[in-house]
Amino acid sequence: MLNTLAEHPAGLTLATLTENLGMPKPTVHRLVSALSDAELTRLDAESGRYRIARGALTLASAFLEGIDVREACLPALRDLSESCGETCHLGIREDLRIIYIEKREAKWPVRMYSRIGNSNPLHCTGIGKAVLAWSADSLVAEVVRAGLHPRTPATIIDPAALRAELAAIRERGWAVDDVENEVSIRCVAAPVFDWEGNPVAAFSVAGPEFRMTDDALARFGPLVRHAGLAASQKLGWRPQR
């Protein structure tokens, strides 16, 4: 129910919420009332719509504050945003998906749409591929077994092609999402390593295809790579000699 309401910031009436959930109306009313008592949802009296309430923010803040990676990465994320002017994300891996835990908006009126808390598959996103490229082969194999489902016509769906792409990412130092996850959106991304050298997060720079040209990707690639290494050093990572 909370996930459904989060996907509809303007709120949902009890009838629409019931329809979306496919549950009996009395059950939905009982549950949303309990969530309201816990200050996780609220009923707007004028519109008759239920919305996410401030209690959800408390839970989200507690979750984010418990992620040391986020705190270590925030300065580098701010610097990256100021350097490139496009939308910048910080994401972590959760199972076979990437969750965006922080972002900085682009300075341009036309920008990509994203929200903190959103998630996307590993195999077709810049952040996901940046993490995969430096992860164990077993994780790559697990992603392949789960299925390389296409999100756009450009999504890599062949396992051999994905492995070749990951090798190219390691050689280059950053990943490229070439309209593979969302139509008309391109991005570059680079990993953040912990003190053991594990990729625990990644930064990305993303924007509309008409601005994220090949020249822009070539400029932003080293910037996002530098941001990843700066944050990695805060987590105790040291380059191999």
Image: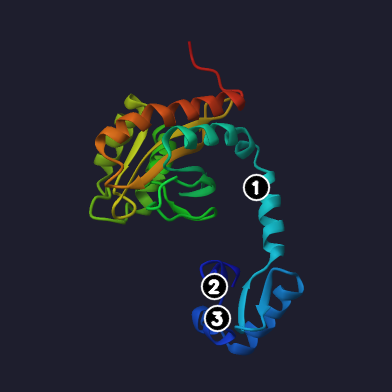
N-terminal of the two: label 3 or label 2?
2
Residue type pointed to by label 2: Ala
Q: Residue at x 44, y 45 (%)?
A: 107
Q: Residues within 10 Å of mark 1 (few under 14, many from 20)?
A: some
N-terminal of the two: label 3 or label 1?
3
In the rendered view, does 122 fall on the left or right side of 184?
A: right
Residue type pointed to by label 1: Leu
Q: Residues within 10 Å of mark 2 (few under 14, many from 20)?
A: few
The residue that mark 1 highlights is 64
Secondary structure of residue under mark 3: helix
**Dot 1 and dot 2 residues touching (CB under 8 Å):** no
**What whole-number distance in Å separates the C-alpha atoms at marks 1 and 2?**
24 Å
**Residue depth check, mark 3 versus mark 2: number of the one nearer the observer:** 2
Q: Residue at x 58, y 34 (%)?
A: 73
Observer-nearest residue: 45 or 131?
A: 45
* Residue 17: mark: 3
Observer-nearest residue: 149 or 146?
A: 149
Count the labels in the image. Answer: 3
**Dot 3 and dot 2 residues touching (CB under 8 Å):** no
In the rendered view, does 107 fall on the left or right side of 163?
A: right
The residue that mark 2 highlights is 10
Secondary structure of residue under mark 1: helix
Q: Residue at x 36, y 35 (%)?
A: 175
Q: Position of residue 147 (x, y in %)?
A: 34, 53
In the rendered view, does 159 fall on the left or right side of 15?
A: left
Note whether residue 97 is visible. Answer: yes
